[in-house]
Amino acid sequence: MENFIFHNPVKIIFGRGTERETGNHTARYGSRVLLHFGGGSIKRTGLYDVVTRSLQEAGVDTIELGGARPNPRLSLVREGISLCRREGVDFILAVGGGSVIDSAKAIAAGAVSDRDIWDYFANPQLEVPAALPLGVVLTLPATGSEASHMAVITNEELTLKRSIGSMHLIPRFSILNPELSVTLSPYQTACGCSDILSHLMERYFTQTEHVDLTDRLLEAAMKTILWCGPRALETPLDYDVRAEIMWTGTLAHNNLLDTGRISDWASHGIEHELSAEYDLAHGAGLSIITPAWMKYVRRAGMEKFVQFACRVFDVDLDFRNPEQIALEGIGRLEDWYRRMKLPVRLSEAGIGEGDLKRLAERSMVGKSSLGRFKVLTAGDVYEIYRLAL
């Protein structure tokens, strides 16, 4: 087990009706707030009215910025930064899913920086020095951004999708009401579950030894998503299923399950090129890339893949030899994605081989390699793309 420091100060307010408390929690941190949201679904569901009424009753002035989209755009972030500076905003409230939250985090960092915000995304060695405080009302469990220090933004001019990480970006509070997720489409629900599962697998596949506690916690979380995901599609109004998914999504990416281990993150880096290029939903890109990555790297840690197959997918240890056990586990993962109506091949998403070499090379822009379970070059990434065809 590696040395570690774990510190996550986000306050979680979980349960039915908790969005009605938004104003009271926000007023503790600011009086002039940027309310950031997406394409208008919060207005159709009535959430917008509940939140704005709560803010008004708490004496909080609001300035609005809608328009956040999946694979959130740098151009809107820059617009938000200018708006915050012009209006004297002292707090940002993100109401939505991971795209809204990540956009809000980038705005929060850029609003108090002398640098252009993209500098931090383009240069991982640059540290984010400060950020406006922010809060979250979560509507889509997926990215875990409601409790993480990370943000991912797409530069649409450069067609690059990159991330930043800073303790300054952890929300001060996050309101999690599973009822708010029942209006999600089956596809949104499936993509969210895929993203959560990927966050768990990125941590699970490590070369760090003697991390059995976090292995077991990760396995339990994975089995929760594997069980609850299909049931959320079958019974979308089931509060308890939605609650399990939402809480697992938060725990999957608040860094608790990273402790003492070195995570991989190659699948995310490889997928980011697809969602940047084709505006593919992140969860759908991960359901394509993750099995291909597994097939490519499995011999770098066969014991871990056998453990994954047996503990997570209940493959019989005596079923076959280790190679076949590992492949059976990967196959069962693909079967689960299919059950969730997600693609497992690039061709199923309408993506051919033509751009793959360019995307593989682009995945290394600003980096020397990808991944820690097995260190990957651009050539390796290209072969993974080919396996995903």
Image (spheres, rainbow, N blue to C red):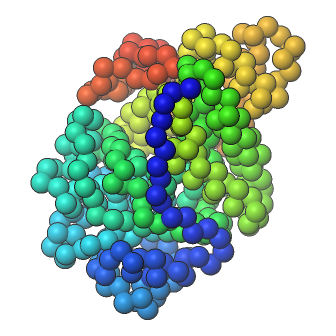
Q: Residue at x 64, y 35 (%)?
A: 214
Instruction: From the viewer's side, name the closer residue of 59 and 293.
Output: 59
Q: Is residue 73 left or right of residue 291?
A: left
Q: Residue at x 75, y 32 (%)?
A: 312
Q: Residue furthest left?
A: 114
Q: Residue at x 22, y 39 (%)?
A: 126
Q: Is residue 361 left or right of residue 100?
A: left
- Image coordinates for residue 331, horizontal then vertical, percent: 72, 24
Q: Quadrant of the C terminus?
A: top right
- Image coordinates for residue 44, horizontal then vertical, percent: 52, 77
Q: Quadrant of the N terminus?
A: top right
Instruction: From the viewer's side, name the closer residue of 176 and 198.
Output: 176
Q: Is residue 300 visible?
A: yes
Quadrant of res 113: bottom left
Q: Residue at x 82, y 29 (%)?
A: 314
Instruction: From the viewer's side, name the closer residue of 76 and 321.
Output: 321
- Image coordinates for residue 207, horizontal then vertical, percent: 55, 19
| Residue 19 higher or lower than 271, as above or below | below
- Image coordinates for residue 59, horizontal then vertical, percent: 37, 90
Q: Is residue 240 left or right of residue 369?
A: right
Q: Is residue 292 visible?
A: no
How many marks on residues? Answer: 0
